[in-house]
Image (cartoon, rainbow, N blue to C red):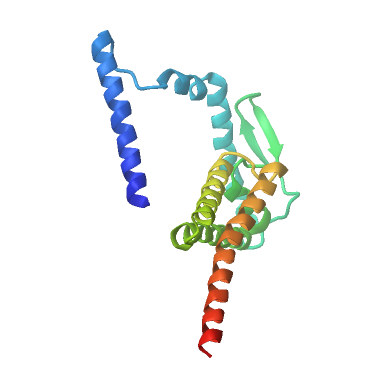
């Protein structure tokens, strides 16, 4: 349940914090967070900073293209120009490394709205399956599908998800499985209701 998940997160933070404080006190060293060096190495390197700045440049240049055709977009072949701090030159690209901006440029506000509607419907189906389906297996499948879809969309906010066909195929598969988990329960309930009505008749 939601309460159990919250308690699990609180307990994990408490255990990690206690171990860190006690270990720092015993060793007499300054307090350092767990995995701090690994995180710093992964995100603080110079090449990572240049890559991040390149994405920021893309996100600043992309809205100018969107404003040209805001409703229906400019299509799949649309390119734009931005300054890439890596090679230190202007580069022309058709990707923004952001799923929202990609949709705005290619399909406009209408396409983004339809994608958002489909995404929210899929997440709602997974969460509803988790909360309402009595079969624990189907409930777990629905929740897992919703969580992975949310993770893929979060990944798509900093990476061009649509160009990676394996991830797009996985996303479509998860949408189908999540909806199937909920649909199977609805079909079973409907069959039971109709059977009960027939018996009473």
Instruction: Please determine whether, in this image, residue 104 is positioned above or below residue 49.
Output: below
Report if residue 94 is visible in the image: no
Q: Residue at x 27, y 25 (%)?
A: 18
Q: Position of residue 154 (x, y in %)?
A: 53, 44
| In front of the other: 147 or 72 | 147
Q: Picture coordinates of residue 186 (x, y %)? A: 55, 69
Residue 104 figure quarter: bottom right
Seen in the picture, residue 150 relative to 88 is either above or below; the reply is below
Q: Give the farthest residue toward the front.
A: 199
Front residue of 73 and 7: 7
Residue drawn at (53%, 55%) of the image: 142
Image position of 122 with respect to 17: above or below: below
Q: Is residue 162 visible?
A: yes
Q: Residue at x 56, y 49 (%)?
A: 149
* Residue 90 percent across, percent down from the top left: 67, 32
In the image, residue 125 above or below residue 201: above
Task: Farthest residue to the top: give it.
Answer: 28
Residue 52: which quarter of the image? top right
- Give the x, y percent position of residue 20: 30, 21
How many numbered markers are drawn?
0
């Amino acid at each position: 349940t939601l309460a159990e998940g919250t308690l699990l997160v609180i307990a994990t933070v408490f255990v990690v914090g206690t171990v860190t404080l006690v270990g720092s006190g015993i060793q007499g060293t300054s307090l350092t967070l767990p995995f701090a060096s690994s995180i710093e190495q992964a995100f603080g390197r110079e090449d990572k900073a240049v890559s991040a700045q390149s994405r920021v440049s893309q996100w600043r240049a992309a809205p100018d293209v969107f404003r040209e055709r805001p409703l229906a977009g400019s299509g799949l072949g649309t390119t734009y120009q931005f300054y890439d701090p890596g090679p230190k030159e202007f580069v022309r690209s058709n990707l923004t490394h952001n799923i929202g901006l990609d949709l705005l440029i290619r399909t406009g506000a209408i396409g983004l709205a339809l994608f958002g509607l489909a995404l929210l419907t899929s997440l709602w189906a997974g969460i509803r399956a988790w909360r309402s389906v009595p079969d624990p297996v189907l409930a777990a499948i629905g929740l897992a599908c919703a969580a992975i879809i949310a993770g893929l969309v979060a990944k798509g906010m900093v990476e061009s998800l649509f160009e990676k066909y394996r991830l797009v195929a996985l996303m479509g598969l998860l949408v189908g499985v999540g909806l199937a988990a909920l649909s199977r329960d609805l079909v079973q309930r409907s069959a039971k209701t109709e059977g009960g009505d027939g018996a009473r008749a």
